[in-house]
Image: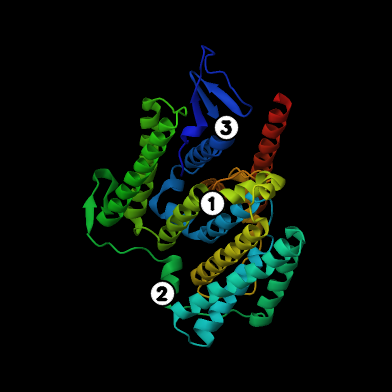
């Protein structure tokens, strides 16, 4: 999870006692906290604590943490692509059907035709890109709203899935694909004792330490860059506490996973995707252009942004990520089924909005979308552990989504009223 960034906290000035300077901020002594960007992480922590108490600690057992990650990996992959589309001011209703049709294609290639799994996987990813290009063309260059194009795509690709599979599933998948979906990293260096925690794989612990070091280096670099440009940064003590909290969270997760069966391969894949897409969104011209298009389309056009090209490629990207999710989901079930991907688009969209995406576009973070997806996963898992019926789970998830969007609208109205 991402900790509060330096931009989220600023020191009160001129003896104002840390009073909120802008809408959406609350005063914490001498500090001002941006609830809009940081509230999602606070909410996630509170939800985890709540269900940990309600389940007598079962939520945070090593096996259950691993189950949460593996069982929701495909939705988290979809949320990465969905947040970029929503930031640009669009929506994609077809991702669930694309998951189904690409999973079916992978099954036909690997199982029925006997192609080597790397070649079949490559063809499946290319097919996902072509699906995204098809939809991106109608949206970007023909001018049809994304809602309509992807709604049509949801029906078209579901029909194509049923045409390929009929009422039957195709499987089993090769061992390598099943390992990617359900498998765990090997214990390369053996286990070490952790006192009352038992043993844990040393290699997994080293990966956690490297991740902590990388996080600390990135945060220090960001802080140093802000100071060099004369921008406000949080007090050093708060900076250290923030790093310590993030390090403790990473180490806790890695230790718990290492105590079970080590790191799931889908977690490794997710970590690579989150890191790569976060860097793309925050550090590249293409990423900043996505924000510019969603924030102010006319200004983006006047600034020379090739809007049509950017929109086209974010839908191509969504197609590729949907294909990855399709293979992961089919590999987890060990077969491609005609009902695969049902309502996945709703889960991905909900994850993006719960994670802080703005309804009008222009706002959102990849890490926020992952956090939103994990909030839904914890709600699903926690309420299942306490024996809640499915309708109650749907009720809570709907209420959380409504509250997240209502908060976004409320902060925008306060911002408008303050001008």
Q: CA distance from mark 1 to mark 3?
A: 27 Å
Q: Secondary structure at mark 3?
A: helix
Q: Is residue 174 left or right of residue 163?
A: left
The image quadrant where one finds the C terminus is: top right
Question: Residue at (44%, 53%) from the top-left corner?
Answer: 275
Alpha-carbon span between mark 1 and mark 2 = 36 Å
Residue 330 pos. (x, y %):
53, 71
The residue labelled by disc 2 is 176
Which mark is drawn over residue 35? 3
Q: Is residue 111 above or below residue 305?
A: below
Q: Residues within 10 Å of mark 3 (few under 14, many from 20)?
A: some
**Residue plotted at (46% across, 33% down):** 6
Which residue occupies the foreground of this view, 135 or 332? 135
**Within 10 Å of the Cα at label 2, are there few (<14), some (14-19), or many (20+) other Cα atoms?**
few
Secondary structure state at the residue bearing disc 1: helix
Horizontal side, residue 291 vs residue 370: left or right: right
Q: Nearer the viewer, residue 301 or 170?
A: 301
Mark 1 or mark 3, earlier in chain: 3
Tag 2 secondary structure: helix
- Reading the chain from its start, which is encountered first: label 1 or label 2? 2
Marks 1 & 3, CB-CB < 8 Å contact: no
What residue is disc 1 on? 285
């Amino acid at each position: 999870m991402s900790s509060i960034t330096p931009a989220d906290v600023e020191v009160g000035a001129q003896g104002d006692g840390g009073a909120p300077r802008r809408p959406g901020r609350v005063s914490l002594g001498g500090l001002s906290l941006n609830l809009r960007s940081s509230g999602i992480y606070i909410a996630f922590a509170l939800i985890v604590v709540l269900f940990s108490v309600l389940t007598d600690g079962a939520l945070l057992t090593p096996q259950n943490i691993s189950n949460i990650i593996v069982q929701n990996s495909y939705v988290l992959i979809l949320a990465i692509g969905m947040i970029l589309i929503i930031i640009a001011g669009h929506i994609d209703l077809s991702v669930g059907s694309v998951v189904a049709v690409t999973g079916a294609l992978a099954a036909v290639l690997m199982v029925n035709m006997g192609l080597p799994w790397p070649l079949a996987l490559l063809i499946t990813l290319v097919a996902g890109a072509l699906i995204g290009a098809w939809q991106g063309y109608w949206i970007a260059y023909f001018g049809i709203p994304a809602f309509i194009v992807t709604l049509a795509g949801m029906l078209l690709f579901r029909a194509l899935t049923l045409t390929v599979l009929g009422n039957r599933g195709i499987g089993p998948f090769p061992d390598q694909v099943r390992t990617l979906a359900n498998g765990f990293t090997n214990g390369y260096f053996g286990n070490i004792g952790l006192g009352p925690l038992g043993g844990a794989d040393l290699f997994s612990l080293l990966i956690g330490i490297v991740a902590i070091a990388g996080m600390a280096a990135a945060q220090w670099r960001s802080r140093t860059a802000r100071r060099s440009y004369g921008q406000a940064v949080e007090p050093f003590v708060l900076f250290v506490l923030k790093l310590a909290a993030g390090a403790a969270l990473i180490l806790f997760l890695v230790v718990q996973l290492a105590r079970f069966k080590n790191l799931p391969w889908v977690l490794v894949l997710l970590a690579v995707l989150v890191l790569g897409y976060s860097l793309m969104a925050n550090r590249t011209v293409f990423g900043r252009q996505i924000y510019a298009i969603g924030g102010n389309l006319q200004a983006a056009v006047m600034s020379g942004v090739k809007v049509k090209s950017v929109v086209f490629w974010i839908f191509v990207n969504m197609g590729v990520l949907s294909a990855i999710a399709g293979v992961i989901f089919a590999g987890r079930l060990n077969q491609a089924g005609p009902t695969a991907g049902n309502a996945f688009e709703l889960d991905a969209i909900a994850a993006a909005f719960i994670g802080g995406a703005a309804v009008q576009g222009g706002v959102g973070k990849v890490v926020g979308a992952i956090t939103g997806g994990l909030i839904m996963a914890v709600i699903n898992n926690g309420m299942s552990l306490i024996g809640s019926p499915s309708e109650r789970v749907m009720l809570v998830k709907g209420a959380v989504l409504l509250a997240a969007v209502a908060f976004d609208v409320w902060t925008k109205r306060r911002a408008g009223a303050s001008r």
